[in-house]
Image: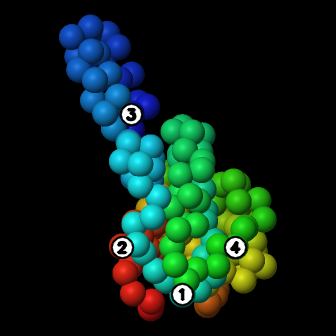
């Protein structure tokens, strides 16, 4: 929101537009900040299990962040990084989309869950809390073994658990 849409809110006011552009230029997604700004890929994290990455629509399509989360995950000790079929496909949440069009949203989610189940992953990580809530809810309702976790939580793990 801040980086992509905030400047749009002030396009009629040059003074505020300049301020919005300034803050947008200093706003980063978490994994993008770690990798591209701080130059960090290995944070010393460890976790045991099969981990799959869900790339959210906002991350990929609006912010063009694609490689950074995977680069961070490759450095986590003890995980087996598994790929999801159609990893770049939407999970079906889309904010109000899932409320306005629950049957379509549910169908898209089911495809994502089927891909998760086929992957054998026991943990799905993402950078988007909306996606994690949607996917996690679907997995829980189906009593699936896989769980969800924000990538920051996984990167904060220092001991195998």
Q: Residue 46 location in percent, x, y?
A: 46, 80
Name the residue carrying label 4.
82
Residue 68 is marked as: none
Name the residue carrying label 1.
48
Name the image quarter holding the C terminus: bottom left
Alpha carbon separation for disc pair 4 and 3: 31 Å
Q: Residue 79 location in percent, x, y?
A: 58, 80
109 w.r.t. 64: above or below: below
Question: Image quadrant of residue 143?
Answer: bottom right
Question: Image quadrant of residue 17?
Answer: top left
77 w.r.t. 22: above or below: below
Which residue is located at x 36 percent, y 48 percent?
38
Alpha carbon separation for disc pair 2 and 1: 14 Å
Tell which tag, 4 or 3, sits nearer the viewer: 4
Name the residue carrying label 2.
156
Alpha carbon separation for disc pair 4 and 1: 13 Å
Front residue (pair 97, 22)? 22
Alpha carbon separation for disc pair 1 and 3: 35 Å
Alpha carbon separation for disc pair 3 and 2: 25 Å
Q: Residue 94 location in percent, x, y?
A: 55, 51
Q: Is residue 23 visible?
A: yes
Q: Is tag 3's residue or tag 2's residue first in the polypeptide sequence? A: 3
Q: Is tag 2's residue or tag 1's residue first in the polypeptide sequence? A: 1
């Amino acid at each position: 929101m801040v980086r992509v849409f905030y400047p749009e809110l002030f396009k009629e006011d040059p003074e505020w537009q300049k301020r919005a552009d300034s803050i947008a230029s200093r706003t980063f997604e978490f994994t993008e900040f770690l990798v591209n700004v701080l130059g960090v890929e290995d944070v010393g994290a460890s976790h045991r299990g099969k981990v799959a990455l869900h790339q959210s629509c906002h991350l990929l399509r609006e912010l063009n962040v694609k490689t950074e989360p995977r680069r961070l995950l490759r450095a986590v000790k003890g995980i087996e990084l598994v790929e999801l079929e159609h990893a770049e496909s939407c999970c079906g949440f889309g904010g109000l989309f899932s409320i306005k069009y629950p049957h379509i949203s549910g169908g898209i989610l089911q495809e994502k869950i089927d891909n998760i189940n086929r992957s054998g992953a026991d943990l799905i990580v993402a950078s988007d809390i909306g996606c994690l809530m949607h996917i996690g809810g679907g997995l829980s309702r189906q009593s699936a073994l896989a769980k969800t976790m924000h990538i920051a939580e996984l990167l904060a793990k220092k001991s195998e658990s």
